[in-house]
Every structure is written in structure tokens, then in C-alpha cells.
Image (cartoon, rainbow, N blue to C red):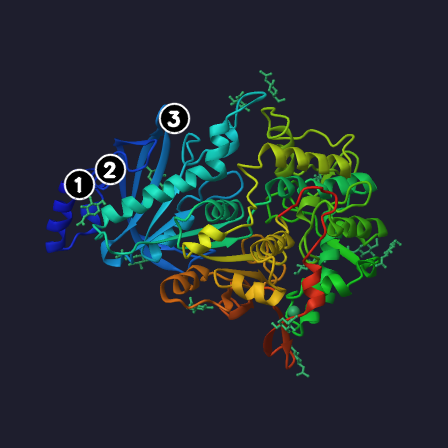
Amino acid sequence: MRFQLSFLVFVGAATAITLNDICTSTYAQLALPAPGFYQGITIDSDSVVTTLASNYSVKDNTFFPNAAISYCNVTFAYTHDGRNDVVHVAYFVPDPSTFTNRFLATGGGGLAINSGLNTVSGGVSIGAVSGLTDGGFGSFNTQEDVHFLLANGSVNWENAYMFGYQAIHEMTVLGKEFARNVMGMQNATKLYAYYQGCSEGGREGWSQVQRFEELDGASIGAPAFRYAHQQIQHLYSNVVEKTLDYFPPPCELTAIVNATIAFCDPLDGKTDGVVSRTDLCKLRFNINSTIGTPYYCAASAGGGGFGPPGSGQPTPVQNGTVSAKAVAVAQTIIDGLHDLQGRRAYVSYQPSATFADAQTKYNNATGKWELSISGLGGEFVTRYIQLQNTSTLASLEGVTYDTLRDWIYDLWQMYEDSFQTTWPDLTKFQAAGGKVLHFHGESDNSIPAASSARYWESVRSVMYPALDYNTSTTKLQDFYRFFLVPGAGHCGANAGQPNGAWPQTSMTQLIDWVEKGVAPDTLNATVALGANKGQNQQICMFPLRPLYTGNGTEQQCVYDQESIDTWHYDLNSWKMPVY
Ligand SMILES: *[C@@H]1O[C@H](CO)[C@@H](O)[C@H](O)[C@H]1NC(C)=O
Ligand SMILES: *[C@@H]1O[C@H](CO)[C@@H](O)[C@H](O)[C@H]1NC(C)=O
Ligand SMILES: *[C@@H]1O[C@H](CO)[C@@H](O)[C@H](O)[C@H]1NC(C)=O
Ligand SMILES: *[C@@H]1O[C@H](CO)[C@@H](O)[C@H](O)[C@H]1NC(C)=O
Ligand SMILES: *[C@@H]1O[C@H](CO)[C@@H](O)[C@H](O)[C@H]1NC(C)=O
Ligand SMILES: *[C@@H]1O[C@H](CO)[C@@H](O)[C@H](O)[C@H]1NC(C)=O
Ligand SMILES: *[C@@H]1O[C@H](CO)[C@@H](O)[C@H](O)[C@H]1NC(C)=O
Ligand SMILES: *[C@@H]1O[C@H](CO)[C@@H](O)[C@H](O)[C@H]1NC(C)=O
Ligand SMILES: *[C@@H]1O[C@H](CO)[C@@H](O)[C@H](O)[C@H]1NC(C)=O
Ligand SMILES: *[C@@H]1O[C@H](CO)[C@@H](O)[C@H](O)[C@H]1NC(C)=O
Ligand SMILES: *[C@@H]1O[C@H](CO)[C@@H](O)[C@H](O)[C@H]1NC(C)=O
Ligand SMILES: *[C@@H]1O[C@H](CO)[C@@H](O)[C@H](O)[C@H]1NC(C)=O
Ligand SMILES: [Ca+2]
């Protein structure tokens, strides 16, 4: 088999192999990793399917600039020996003339382990063979939760570990070998391996960096990695509303967000509608000042609240003034989960983020706004803790702040070695020469930006306990750089602060770091929305923070201890360390 492939490659080399040559099941079969290449895995060579796509447009992609690409989608199945399961992987092979000796592993979002064509197409645009996996969950479109239970009370642990870290690892190791073979690379030629993912995909990226040394570089956005804390905190806003017995109309919370942005925007020295310093906002803004602010939102046939128009249920006209009760709800949410003894259990969203988890629903019969339990949080209680086959949590009856803390503890213990992904010692990855670019939208409304800042600090303090803050920070930045992205939302630009830029070319900068030794001191970012679309901005590297002088014309990245301190929290509700 290997001989035949070399033969094909050799013959091809004389005449230059084309994507068409590669995109046949015969050729792809010859490029499969050899039997025994990965202990415990047997590839079904009859399962190979190839599909050619020409002139596909990568357009308005969050992580890659526009490009027209051609690729061959090669899929195959493998099984874990002795288990009789079936896992599918797909590798998107670029035209050999554009191949840059790169492999890109990709992840998913929410409860999906892949992002379809979205990220792999960007990978092809940088000349990488790009891989995704179905995790063994049934199909490329099957989410992880669907087969998480074998029956009520009975966890499908293989799925848990596959989702946790194993499936992406296998896809990466097999994919690197497949890429070498399919491109006929010489043994001595270096194949650079990268990862790109955000949110759950960000967690998956960290799962690889924390456990393996397969990647040369990872570009990771807003990771959902402190899994138990992260998923249960989606219910916190609802429990605040229930505890304070106030269910604000969405428009009232939007008015609070707008007033917050209006006050905090200039604190960074540039009045551009972007809160580039949510830390200063935390220190200087008194949300009580919004009480009495008038608000008005027109009736909507659907989409009232925070989603795009048409996404929600019909909402009536909302016209009023911001109430003290709404402000109490907003302030308590921003303060973050504390137990009933007042000890802090988790962090929360930065001021200026929308209150997405606090979304209420309108009851047309009573004319009142009511509790709407976050679907993001509920499933983690019912399916993942109670092991019941349902994605909805029917009620928050009897649920207190202590209940939330206890749910976090349960989820944390149950999935400490599968989903909880905050191992802070990256020594092995560092020693292997790996590099990480980690970034997080500062106004993220789904995963708190402070969650990422906490992990960066955990890695710093665990890896360099004997060094002072600045020295350890410099050491850490040799291989791990963290950036808060002003104004950005969850894994992308934010319509509420459209003049904020998004680091769409982070993969290019990562490649320059890995392949040319050019480490980015600022993240290159581009405005993706609004009148300034296309404008370039540079994002400061944490712990430095942006500050504008010259009436907003000159950006500096400053060291501000008071601001840095706002990103660090004592989670004293826990006896265990929370990395
Ligand atoms: C590729 O697509 C673009 C626009 O989608 C089109 O303008 C161009 O002619 C196409 N090129 C080929 C070779 O089909
Ligand atoms: C790749 O090909 C497989 C097999 O034909 C197909 O199921 C899958 O949808 C394709 N993936 C994408 C992202 O086009
Ligand atoms: C869980 O419920 C879904 C329908 O909601 C059903 O299709 C599936 O078979 C059930 N799974 C188990 C393990 O009971
Ligand atoms: C490349 O490496 C493989 C596996 O180690 C070996 O079998 C093969 O002979 C090598 N090929 C060359 C040309 O060195
Ligand atoms: C909030 O500000 C946006 C502009 O960013 C505006 O479209 C919206 O109407 C405002 N909403 C409220 C309730 O003030
Ligand atoms: C805001 O108002 C509440 C209720 O009157 C009060 O308890 C709280 O101390 C005020 N907060 C600030 C920062 O003034
Ligand atoms: C409430 O019900 C009335 C009568 O059925 C209907 O006309 C109206 O559109 C509904 N409003 C909302 C916000 O659902
Ligand atoms: C909102 O309600 C107030 C008082 O009822 C009224 O004066 C005002 O015109 C309303 N605003 C809009 C835009 O309908
Ligand atoms: C499993 O749990 C779900 C959700 O509670 C329930 O609807 C279903 O009836 C249960 N199935 C069995 C077989 O008990
Ligand atoms: C740490 O470095 C910053 C500049 O990046 C400097 O302003 C600060 O004084 C330094 N702190 C100490 C303790 O040296
Ligand atoms: C930086 O972003 C700008 C657009 O804002 C783009 O033109 C440029 O190519 C990017 N630089 C890199 C290194 O990708
Ligand atoms: C400062 O910048 C703002 C907006 O860019 C502009 O409207 C204002 O005139 C400037 N002020 C001065 C003193 O230049
Ligand atoms: Ca600003």
C-alpha cells in the first residue's frame, strides 16, 4: 500500500498532482494511516468517500479573511478495537499547488464537536489540510447530548471522553499522518499542526494543549473550559430574577446596557461607542444612576429581547422607565454567584455585556413578563447531573444560590476528568515548543471574559510560583499570550458596540509566531460591522490595557494595577482550588 502511494506520488510529481487526482477514493485509500499506526484504532478503508468542491467562497468568516478555495472533502470511518463503535472523520484537502505543509484541527460549539464547513474552509484558505470529527455520535450533524445517556441513569462514558478530549486528539493524530501521505511529504519535511476554535471549540482546543503535544500552535477564543461553573452560571441570572421576584422586560435591561455603554465608553479616552475598559467601568460606574432612564421598544412579531429579529416570540410595546428592581437584578447578576453565606462561587459578565441569560418571556394572558429558564443551563442539571433523558429543566422551584453552587460541585466532580478543562500546568506543551493565542470578547454575554483571565492567571501562578508578577508574565508570554477584545461579544463582533474590532487574522499571526518566530505583541483586528467596517485596530496583550490619548487618536497599552485587580476574584465558596 505504502509502495503504491509512493508510486502514485512519484508519477504525480513528474506531471504535478492535481486536486482531481487526489479526490478519488483509490488515491485517498492509499493515503490512509497504515494499520497499527494508532494503537487501538482500526480504519475501515472501504468507508472512504471523496467529494470535490471548486471555487467555494469563504466570506464574512469570523476567523478567516475572504477567499475562494477548492478542496476535496475526504471522509472515512474507524473503530476502537474491542468496542465496535464507529467514528467518522473528514479531512478537507487543498489543491496541492496551494499546500503550505500545514494541518489544521477544528472543533465545534455548544454541544457540537465540529463546525461543519465553517472553520475547515478557512483552514483550506491558509493551505492546510483541515480536519473535523463526528466524535462517534452518529453523524457529522449529531450533537453530543443526543446519545449521552444509554438509558436514564446510565451514562455513555465513551461519548463523554470522546467529547471531552479524545475525539479531537484522534482526528489530529490521524489527520497529520493522512496529510503527510496525501501530499506525499518527505519524512524530513516539517508538517505544522494548528488548532482553531471558539466557545466549546475553545474548550476543545485547551483540552489538546493541556494533555497532548501534537499541536505547534492553537488559536483559542472564549473557551467554555471551566465547564461545571460555566454551564451552571447560565442559570444564575434566572435565579437572581426569581430570588428578587422581578422579571424585567428585555427592553428595560437593554436600556441599562445602553446607559452603561454611554457612561463607560469615554473612560478609555476615546468616545467611539466601545467600552474598551470594562475594568474601569466596573470601578467607576454606579448602575443605580440608570434608575428613571426612559426606555421604549416597539412591539415585535418575534425577536424581542436579545436575539436577531424574528428569533423570539412576539413581544408587546415596552415603554417605561428603568426601575430600582431592574437595577437590583442587573447589579446582582454583574456581582456574580455568591452562596447564601455571601462567599463568592463564580465570576460574571462584564458591565456592557447584554443580559442574555436574563431573558424573560411575555405572557399574553396575564400581560406580564415571566421567568424563562435558560436552555443553555437547564440541560446540565437534568441530563448531566440527574441523568434524565431531557434537555429542559421544568422549574426553578426551591432553587437558591446554594443549589447552584451545589450543582456546580456535582457537575465538577462527575466530569472533572472529561469536560472540566482547566489543568493549569502547560509544561509539556511548552517544552514541545507549542504556542497559544487566547482571546475573549470583553463584552461576551455567554462566557464571562473574566473566566479566561482567571485561567491565564492560574497558569501564570502555577507554572511560575517563585517569580514576581512581571517576570512570570514575561516568561508565560514566551508561549502563551492572552488578549481581551474590547467591545466584542461571544466569539465575534457585537452589534451593540459595532466600532469594536475582531481578531479575524489571529491564525495568520499564530503562524508567523510558530513558523517565523514573530510573536504578536498586539492582536491584529478588523472592524466587522457598521460604518467603519474594514478598519484596522490593534488589541493590547493582557495584562496591559488600552488607553487613548490625543482625544482618541493615539492608543497606548498601559499597566494599571487597579484595573488588573478587578479581573481576579477570590472564589472563597470553594475549598478546592478553582483554576
Ligand atoms: C469563482 O466564483 C466567483 C464568485 O463567486 C466568480 O466570480 C468566479 O468567476 C468563479 N471562478 C471560477 C473559476 O469559477
Ligand atoms: C464531507 O463529506 C461527507 C461525506 O460525503 C458529508 O457527509 C459531509 O457533509 C461533507 N462535509 C462538508 C462540511 O461538506
Ligand atoms: C431520549 O429521548 C429521545 C426523544 O426525546 C429519544 O429519541 C431517545 O431514544 C431517548 N434516549 C434514551 C436513551 O432513552
Ligand atoms: C519514512 O518513515 C517511514 C516510517 O518511519 C519509513 O517506513 C520510511 O522508510 C521512511 N521513508 C523514507 C524515504 O525515509
Ligand atoms: C440601545 O441602543 C441601540 C443602539 O446601539 C438602539 O438601537 C436601541 O434602540 C437602544 N435600546 C434601548 C432600549 O435604549
Ligand atoms: C444602589 O442602590 C441600592 C438600593 O438603594 C443600594 O443598596 C446600593 O448601595 C446602591 N449602590 C451604590 C453603588 O450606590
Ligand atoms: C396577544 O394576543 C392578542 C389577541 O390574541 C394578539 O392580537 C396580540 O398580537 C398578542 N400579543 C402578543 C405580544 O403576543
Ligand atoms: C411612552 O409612554 C408615555 C407615558 O405613557 C407616553 O407619554 C409616551 O408618548 C410613550 N412613548 C412612546 C414612544 O410611545
Ligand atoms: C427518562 O427520563 C425522561 C425525563 O425525565 C422521562 O420523560 C422518561 O419517561 C424516562 N424514561 C424512562 C424509561 O423512565
Ligand atoms: C511591571 O511592569 C509594568 C510595565 O509593564 C510596570 O509599569 C510596573 O511598574 C512593573 N511592576 C513591578 C512591580 O515592577
Ligand atoms: C491585519 O488586518 C488587516 C485588516 O484589518 C489586514 O489587511 C492585514 O492583512 C492583517 N495582517 C495580518 C498579519 O494578517
Ligand atoms: C474629539 O473627538 C471627537 C470625536 O472624534 C470630536 O467630535 C471632537 O470634536 C474632538 N474634540 C477635540 C477637542 O478635538
Ligand atoms: Ca471608547
Secondary element at image label 1: helix
In front here: 251 or 262?
A: 262
In front here: 359 or 393?
A: 393
Q: Nearer the viewer, mark 2 or mark 3?
A: 2
Q: Nearer the viewer, mark 3 or mark 1?
A: 1
Circles 1 and 2, Cβ within 8 Å, touching? The answer is yes
The amino acid at mark 3 is Asp
Q: Where does label 1 land, which residue? A: 2
Secondary element at image label 3: loop
Using the rendered view, name the quadrant where residue 483 is placed.
Answer: bottom right
C-alpha gap between disc 2 and disc 3: 20 Å
Q: Position of residue 421 (x, y in %)?
A: 55, 43
Using the rendered view, name the quadrant where residue 246 is placed.
Answer: top right
In front here: 284 or 300?
A: 284
Badge 1 residue CB within 8 Å of ligand 4: yes
Are there few (<14), some (14-19), or many (20+) residues within 10 Å of tag 3? some
Are there few (<14), some (14-19), or many (20+) residues within 10 Å of tag 1? few
Q: Determine whether, in the image, residue 81 is placed left or right of residue 379.
A: left
Q: Position of residue 464 (x, y in %)?
A: 57, 58
Residue 368 drawn above or below residue 348: above
Label ID, residue 85: 3
Secondary element at image label 2: loop
Label ID, residue 34: 2
